[in-house]
Image (cartoon, helix red, strand yellow):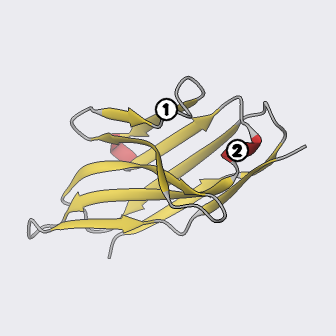
Amino acid sequence: QVQLVESGGGLVQPGGSLSLSCEASGSIFSINSMGWYRQAPGKQRELVATFTWTGTTTYADSVKGRFTISRDNAKNTVYLQMNSLKPEDTAVFYCNLGYRNRFGAYRDIWGQGTQVTVSS
């Protein structure tokens, strides 16, 4: 069983910073991609930042220059450093993992979500 454990998030004032982390554990043969999505109230879930294990990084236009995604390969962990936060960044942030198990089957799973609230 593969699990994602998210941490970080919380309440921050506009202009502030927060950091999220997501650790994958379990029977993972190889990772294809890992990253962060978010869902604001009344809106669809959207990509924030993600990368493939071969090195391609993708950011939403709305977070470019403010958010940075990074990873620790040895720990199967991805981080999201969020700076210059805006009220419109308020959302539940979800970690996503695309991986292959030992049988070669591709799986796509989600974390439980962590709330980020930007408000004065």
Q: Which mark is residue 97?
A: none
Q: Which mark is residue 61?
A: 1
Q: Position of residue 49 (x, y in %)?
A: 45, 41
What amino acid is found at the position of numbered circle 1 in the picture?
Asp
Q: Point out the image quarter for the N terminus.
A: bottom left
What amino acid is found at the position of numbered circle 2 in the picture?
Glu
Q: Point out the image quarter for the C terminus.
A: top right
Residue at image location 52% in from the left, 27% down from the top: 64
User: Outermost residue, top direction?
Assistant: 65
Task: Classify mark 1: helix, strand or loop.
Answer: loop
Residue at image location 25% in from the left, 41% down from the top: 53
Q: Nearer the viewer, residue 66 or 7?
A: 66
Q: Position of residue 62 (x, y in %)?
A: 56, 34
Task: Classify mark 2: helix, strand or loop.
Answer: helix
CB atoms of marks 1 and 2 within 8 Å: no
User: Outermost residue, front direction?
Assistant: 42
Q: Which residue is mark 2?
A: 88
Could you tell whether 60 is left or right of 65 in the image?
Answer: left
